[in-house]
Image (spheres, grey):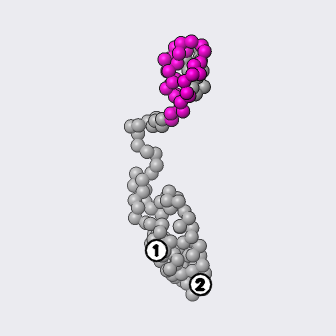
Amino acid sequence: MEQVKCPSCGASVGSGDASCRYCGESLSRSSQPNYSAPAQQPQVIVVNAQPNQQSSLPVYSSDKSKITAAILAFFLGGIGIHKFYLNKAGLGILYILFCWTLIPSFVAVIEGIIYLTMNDYSFNEKYNRRIA
C-alpha cells in the first residue's frame, strides 16, 4: 500500500484512507495538498491499551501516616516513640536506652525530615502493609 503524508500534521497514512488517523483531517484524492484550509492542531487521545486489567500498582493499608511519624520524630523522637509507631520496636528500645546521650534526638530530627520529604509510594512500601 502506498503511503502519503497528511497535509495537516505530516503523518504517513495510507493512500486509500479517507482521513488521517492521527489528526482527523480529511484527505483529498489528489496528490497536491490543500493549503487553503487552516491547519488544525492534532488531537491527542490517550487510550488505555488494556482497559479490563487492574492497575499494576500495589494497594496498601494506610494505617501509618508519614505526617504523624514526622511529628512524633520531631517532638518525641529522643525516646523513640516514632519507631514504636512505625512497628520498629527494637529500634524504639535502642532509642530509649541511649536517650540520655541526646544522640537519638538528633537522629530523630533527621528522620523526621526524611519522612516529610519521602514520597507516599516509598513510605508505603517501607512502613505500611500490602493488601493486594
**Is residue 24 a member of the stretch shown in magenta?**
yes
Camera-nearest residue between 129 and 42: 42
Q: Which residues are magenta?
A: 15-44
**What's the magenta bit mostly, secondary-structure-wise?**
loop
Tag 1's secondary structure?
A: helix
Image coordinates for residue 43, horizontal then vertical, percent: 50, 33
Distance between the alpha carbons at the discs numbered 1 and 2: 18 Å
Q: Quadrant of residue 110?
A: bottom right
Question: 40 above or below 15?
Answer: below
Q: Residue at x 49, y 17 (%)?
A: 18
First reached walking from the N terminus: tag 1 or tag 2: 1
Residue 27 position, x and y percent, is 52, 18
Residue type (three-letter) at the residue carrying disc 2: Leu
Judge whether 43 appears above or below 126 on screen.
above
Q: Residue at x 59, y 84 (%)?
A: 102
Whether residue 83 is visible to the viewer of this picture, yes or no, is: no
Confirm whether the magenta stretch covers residue 36: yes
Mark 2: which secondary structure? loop
Picture coordinates of residue 54, whole percent (x, y): 41, 43
Name the mark nearer the viewer: 1 or 2.
2
As drawn, which residue projects farthest toward the bottom? 100
Residue at (46% x, 45% y) in the render: 56
In this figure, which residue is indicated by the disc labeled 2? 102
Q: Quadrant of residue 36?
A: top right
Number of the label disc, if any, that sits on residue 107: none
The amino acid type of the residue labelled 1 equals Phe
Please tell me which residue is depicted at 53% across the width and 12% down the height of the picture. Answer: 29
Q: x, y (%) of residue 68?
A: 45, 71
Reading the image, the residue beneath label 1 is: 84
